[in-house]
Amino acid sequence: MKLEFTEKNYNSFVLQNLNRQRKRKEYWDMALSVDHHVFFAHRNVLAAVSPLVRSLISSNDMKTTDELFITIDSSYLSPVTVDQLLDYFYSGKVVISEQNVEELLRGAQYFNTPRLRVHCNNFLIKSIRHANCLRYLFLAELFELKEVSDLAYSGIRDNFHYWASPEGSMHFMRCPPVIFGRLLRDENLHVLNEDQALSTLINWVYFRKEEREKYFKKFFNYINLNAVSNKTLVFASNKLVGMENTSSHAALIENVLMDRKQERPCSLLVYQRKGALLDSVVILGGQKAHGQFNDGVFAYIIQENLWMKLSDMPYRAAALSATSAGRYIYISGGTTEQISGLKTAWRYDMDDNSWTKLPDLPIGLVFHTMVTCGGTVYSVGGSIAPRRYVSNIYRYDERKEVWCLAGKMSIPMDGTAVITKGQHPLRAQPPAECGNQSAESEGQQDDHLSASLAQQLPLGCVPCYMLHWRQQGVCMWGYHHCQRCPNKGLHHQSKCLLAGPKDRRVEDPGSPTRGTGLSCLLSSQATLQDSSKDLNNILSGRISKCTIIHNLMREREEDGLLFPS
């Protein structure tokens, strides 16, 4: 009789014991030396996973009694990384982080281990985000990781307005010429305008003037001077005085300035590159005057004073909420004819003009507030039924694709205005009751901001939403009066309330269709594909900087926010 028995996980058992022997320096026949640190190993194990070790053994005709010594430059691989690599060779397990991924890629390159390279590549793809895409692009170009390179480049291109701003330029000024030139040449580059592209080029050259001055002539040709304002052209002309061989470029600038003096002034918008951003107001969903729920997504182009239709939402609803993060608009919740509190959530890709279904919210919500903070999407407060308010704050985890409970407000409420500033905590502003406009918030309180808002509100009016703090001004669109308001004749009027410089004010666009329960975004830091027939592609794919207003109310047909049908 014969019976066969198989040990479970025997391969792991053997490798674990060999790894223990390595750490105890038992039966070793090779060693790796890094900066006075010596790591002992078994050449049979390393030869099985590394073609480098295998070739060293075969090319040197080593005998079984010979010992193999490898010296590694500490500037290329640190002792910590070599120790981690040996653990990976023996166990097949590796912990990758943003801090060690570059050295692990070097190790994979040095020992010629393609599987480790694949792990690093997958880590970079899954962990890429707004703040690290520039560094990831450097790594992708260095180690020839095409998929990572494409994702990282898109991240920089689509957020160029951030990298060129004072906040992001500290790191971006170190961008190598090959990447900087590729970006500046890209017609889809998301700049605020061509002024920003020219200013960034000059600042980039002056950051390392001696070594970068030679690139100016080539990169200057990527700038459309007809799209640059007179002020920036004069600034650029003055800067060229400090550079060599730039007389021809200065002459081009002078020609543009002279032509503008002789010709009738025209809008610079028509000369902007395709990816240049526009300030716009985006309206989603709502309920029409006759009660029908709406699924339209419209944008009001502030600079051109016109409306354009962008898309249709996957569902018709009012009292929903929305926020933007990069190229995406996130929407969730709302009410329909059948359901008073929806759990559904969707993401709209403004570049591709496409919708993606997201996991449902944990509970059905109306009059909640979605907001983006630090690149993460949150849902704050809301109602699950009339006068049944919630205090929950949910966070959407992109990696796990799930909504998580991030915290709770001190009091349950809906119609909450949420303010974000950079990476700071969320600040919640409850709707004002009739005759009571006190501000309560979760976390840090900005007294000046709350006071400035209260001064702009009509007495006893509930703000529909507060837009972001921009150029020392708060811009709000719409409010409604509560039942106890003394001005009953003005119930549910939608108005444009503004604070800040006059030249940044958004006036009533005036298209004669009315609605209620809308969700509205002001500008979006991403692009939107033009679906209008009459704009001649001038506005195609360009809308910038987005925050939210929502829950606009209407009682009489002659009142309410005006928006296109």
Image (cartoon, rainbow, N blue to C red):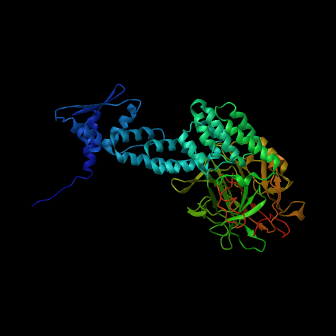
Q: In this picture, is 283 found above or below 135? A: below
Residue 209 position by quadrant: top right
Q: In the depicted view, which residue is nearer to us: 284 or 550? A: 284
Image label count:
0
- Placement of 103 over or under 332, stated as above or below: above
Quarter of the figure that contains the C terminus:
bottom right
Picture coordinates of residue 99 (x, y %)? 47, 38
- Percent position (x, y) of residue 457? 84, 52
Q: Is residue 416 visible?
A: no
Q: Residue at x 73, y 74 (%)?
A: 292
215 or 165, nearer to the observer: 215
- Give above or below for 11 relative to 510: above
Q: Position of residue 98 (x, y in %)?
A: 48, 41
* Residue in the image at 37% along x and 45% along y: 116
Picture quarter with the N terminus? bottom left
* Residue 112 appears in the rendering: yes
Q: Is residue 373 left or right of residue 17?
A: right
Identity of the residue furthest to the top in this view: 36
Residue 304 in picture, x, y percent from top left: 77, 57
Q: Quadrant of residue 551?
A: bottom right
Is 27 placed above or below 51 here? Answer: above
Q: Is residue 76 left or right of residue 163?
A: left
- The front one of 386 and 514 is 514
